[in-house]
Image (spheres, rainbow, N blue to C red):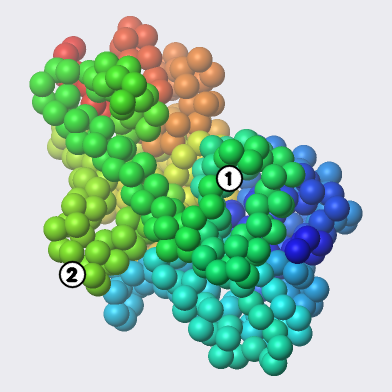
Amino acid sequence: MTVKKICCIGAGYVGGPTCAVIAYKCPGIQVTIVDLNQARIDAWNSDNLPIYEPGLEDVVFARRGKNLFFSTDVDKAINDADLIFVSVNTPTKKTGMGAGSAADLAYVESATRRIAEVATSSKIVVEKSTVPCRTAQSMRTILEANCRENIRFDILSNPEFLAEGTAITDLFNPDRVLIGALQTEEGLKAQQALVEIYTHWVPIERVITTNLWSSELSKLAANAMLAQRISSINALSAICEATGADVDEVAYACGRDSRIGPKFLKASVGFGGSCFQKDILNLVYLAEQFHLPEVAAYWRQVVIMNEYQKERFVHRIISTLFNTITNKKIAVLGFAFKKDTGDTRESAAITLIKDFIQEHARVHLYDPKVEHAQIYMDLIEPGVADSKAQVEKHLTICSSAYEACQDADAVVVVTEWDEFKDTHLDYQKIYDSMHKPAFIFDGRLILDAPKLRKMGFKVEVIGKHNLAGTA
Ligand SMILES: NC(=O)c1ccc[n+]([C@@H]2O[C@H](COP(=O)([O-])OP(=O)(O)OC[C@H]3O[C@@H](n4cnc5c(N)ncnc54)[C@H](O)[C@@H]3O)[C@@H](O)[C@H]2O)c1
């Protein structure tokens, strides 16, 4: 079967870029990306796209209105399509059974039910969302129980491995594309149809075909292993700070071993993003369900270590600032969970600013991409600040790093945006404008600490013992 029309349900960080790239690479296929959120679709149809990703505008503007469409007419797009990607959100459940670790599959189920209700012809349905192992089975049961006569649905699992901030280059040149299918004649035919879409630009050797359950589990496993490496180097960063070892040197020395490799060994204030924590917790829940408590505890520790790293950094800041930050002005550089994205989900900045506010500091924040409304929304979430008034009293959002640092007692680098590096920002100007002693805390290891110390800064870096002392 050759796919001519694709529908993608969910116009978020994954559905938008992924299907825009399919439209770009396959001009002969019509791609319609749909969402229930009218504001998001309006933004996709405007000059100001709803998400920031380097290279995304070029892709969207090249194909939009030709073979790439954004719409809220979910039913029409479902009906027109031969193949449907389900790319809706699967957040961690906040209440009920499995709260705090299980994935909330309500959006997947609702999209699946919609497909069953409105489809008047057979479809290939592709799980793009990250889901617990065996979700495809539930989708199949729902589709088969609710569809019209003589219609068949083939379910595939095609998890997405793009990383925010490099989504377009990742999609153009993926390490691998993973497609899981039921090992039946029809399942394998559907799998082949999706293989043919990707091989428009991905070499066939990079397309991995597996059974459905391996594909679903591989996505959770890959994210768990990536997060585990970050927690491992962060655990070592605590030992470095205590002993005088330098975490960058340790990471380099370990990474030179070809069995270990250099990637994902950068110590930091902790990982964020919508996926790592959620997917590990998902794996933990799966292990618990299968009565594997040791396995669950092993993976849970990766998340515990991540929380510990943020706490440790806050303690270090407070103790360095003479054990109190009450009324002190703290300049926070960065709110996105990493550079080159406007995404703030699970960003370490949220935890840090929450703690600073609770200590009655005056926080002055600058981020180059995150919208002000998003910052307030994240900080007013239950469990973060007590009230909107409290946030407004303690937080000022600034329009430049210089403005945030003016008269500050301390600067805290939370996101590794290139523009915060000492090769881009004039730290002498910042030093001159700050209260003295002028402290700087590097939570991302992006600054040249000896150079800043020469200017007069008191510098504290994650994973590095301050041999010079701060006082
Ligand atoms: N963000 C990432 O970096 C990343 C990477 C790989 C995989 N994933 C996975 O991909 C999935 C989507 O993630 P995301 O970051 O794009 O989420 P997102 O929240 O940015 O987007 C999901 C979109 O789905 C829409 N939606 C929900 N239910 C719908 C329905 N029934 N009909 C139409 N639209 C509906 C929402 O309005 C939202 O716009 C998740 O399962 C996530 O774990 C995310």
In what quadrant of the picture does the C terminus appear?
top left
User: Would you name the residue on which mark 1 appears?
Assistant: 207
Residue 334 x %, y %: 46, 38
Q: Which residue is pictured at 31% across the width and 38% down the height?
A: 230
Q: Residues within 10 Å of mark 1 (few under 14, many from 20)?
A: some
Residue 327 appears in which quarter of the rendering? top left
Which residue occupies the foreground of this view, 90 or 392?
Answer: 90
Q: Of the numbered discs in the image, which one, if any, rests on residue 291?
A: 2
Q: Which residue is pictured at 32% across the width and 56% down the height?
A: 280
Marks counted in the figure total: 2
Direction from residue 88 to residue 450 in the image, left or right: left
Q: In terms of sequence position, does the residue under pointer 2 or pointer 1 come before the other?
A: 1
Direction from residue 118 to residue 291 in the image, left or right: left
Q: Which residue is pictured at 11% across the width and 26% down the height?
A: 242
**Element type where label 2 sits in the image:** loop
Which residue is most to the right?
66
Q: Is residue 456 above or below residue 306?
A: above
